[in-house]
Image (tube, grey):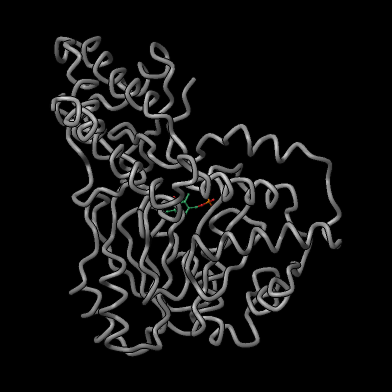
Amino acid sequence: MLLFTPGPTPVPESVRQAMATPTLHHRTPEFEAIFKETRDLLFKLFATDEVIILASSGTGAMEAAVTNLCHDTLLSVNSGKFGERFGKIALASGLKNVEIKHEWDTPASVEELVEAVKANPSIDALAIQVSESAGGLRHPVEEIAAAVKAINPSIMIIADGITAVGVERIDVENIDCLIAGSQKALMLPPGLAILGLSNEAIKKTGEGKGYYLNLASEIKKQKQNTTAYTAATTLIIGLRAVLQEIESYADGAGVGKLFCDTARRAKATHLALEALGLHIYPKTPAKSMVTIDDKNAKEIRDLLKTDFGVNVAGGQDHLKGKIFRINQMGLIETYETVWVVNAVELALAKLGRRDFDGTASRIFNEEYFKSMLKKEEK
Ligand SMILES: *Cc1c(COP(=O)(O)O)cnc(C)c1O
């Protein structure tokens, strides 16, 4: 069965092998050396002033960011389940919350956030997803961050990049905290979260808030290549292997080439499915996944699984049975995605929606291999 859900994503063979080595003690020079190498690789990927690894799922890093970087009112954007979570974390932590809410296909606008910040002087942090996985949409985070900083540079900008770090380049110039999680774009089993922090964010953590999710104590320890509490040693060894795998992607072309191929593959998938008469759900699609809303979403998803060996994700809450989401994160073989779009076309034929004529794989191939095909014409 091909795993094509936007988290968890498949773990590469080399990474599984790396994690099969005997357990190391976390307070040893041997592990500290691994931790340092992993940190160095993370600095390259995040391009932030500091990086912190936590043993938690992604939500743990969201909570750490909110409780350490917001001391009064959190402005959050709810265009889906994960944006909604930021508001819930703020309220559960005794903070105030101003929420901007949209349908799950609709991104936040720069104007409405600027307005909210101007109207609420107690807002001291903004939390938003780069890629909101609930409906597969991309928020204009970089533009929003720049506009909010222009009004008040002390407002902390928290960007949840759990389905964006490792997918595309994110400009962190105005971002104070960029979050990643292990089981999405980083191709690891669940259990690790990473925060990239700005120097301003480090200052704001001050003495730190909370106990386990206290960023000040983690920063102090992780600068010394160790962790405040027992490190998730096996997952960190896996993380180092993933980051090395990304660095050596396409015979050493590296992360830039990975971002480029991911964007091409997402676009080719998008065009192939549109050519079948399907509709892309989000108004501003993220590159991390391709999301289709369809009256037969459930039937298509079931057929993909039972007849064609493909596992794609459905929708949650009010979108249950109404959408399906095809992953684009991680190291994906192009031929696998060609099979997925072909399988969607076969499923539509099986449902009597349209005759099968190979449109999906043809359009995918023409789009993805466009430059190569052009060269051959000459
Ligand atoms: C999956 C996801 C999360 C939550 O991560 P968990 O690991 O399930 O805690 C948060 N934000 C986004 C955008 C996600 O896709």
User: Quadrant of the rendered structure where residue 359 is?
Assistant: top left
Q: Residue at x 38, y 39 (%)?
A: 328
- For the image shown, how many numbered marks are present on the structure? 0
Q: Residue at x 63, y 63 (%)?
A: 39
Q: Is residue 133 left or right of residue 237?
A: left
Q: Is residue 302 above or below residue 251?
A: above
Q: Position of residue 165 (x, y in %)?
A: 44, 56
Q: Is residue 46 left or right of residue 145?
A: right
User: Quadrant of the rendered structure where residue 146 is?
Assistant: bottom left
Q: Residue at x 24, y 58 (%)?
A: 107
Q: Is residue 70 above or below residue 16?
A: below
Q: Is residue 320 above or below residue 182?
A: above
Q: Is residue 355 above or below residue 312?
A: above
Residue most extreme to the front: 378
Q: Residue at x 59, y 53 (%)?
A: 57
Q: Position of residue 16 (x, y in %)?
A: 66, 35
Quadrant the C terminus occupies: top left
Q: Position of residue 206 (x, y in %)?
A: 61, 87
Q: Position of residue 293 (x, y in %)?
A: 23, 35
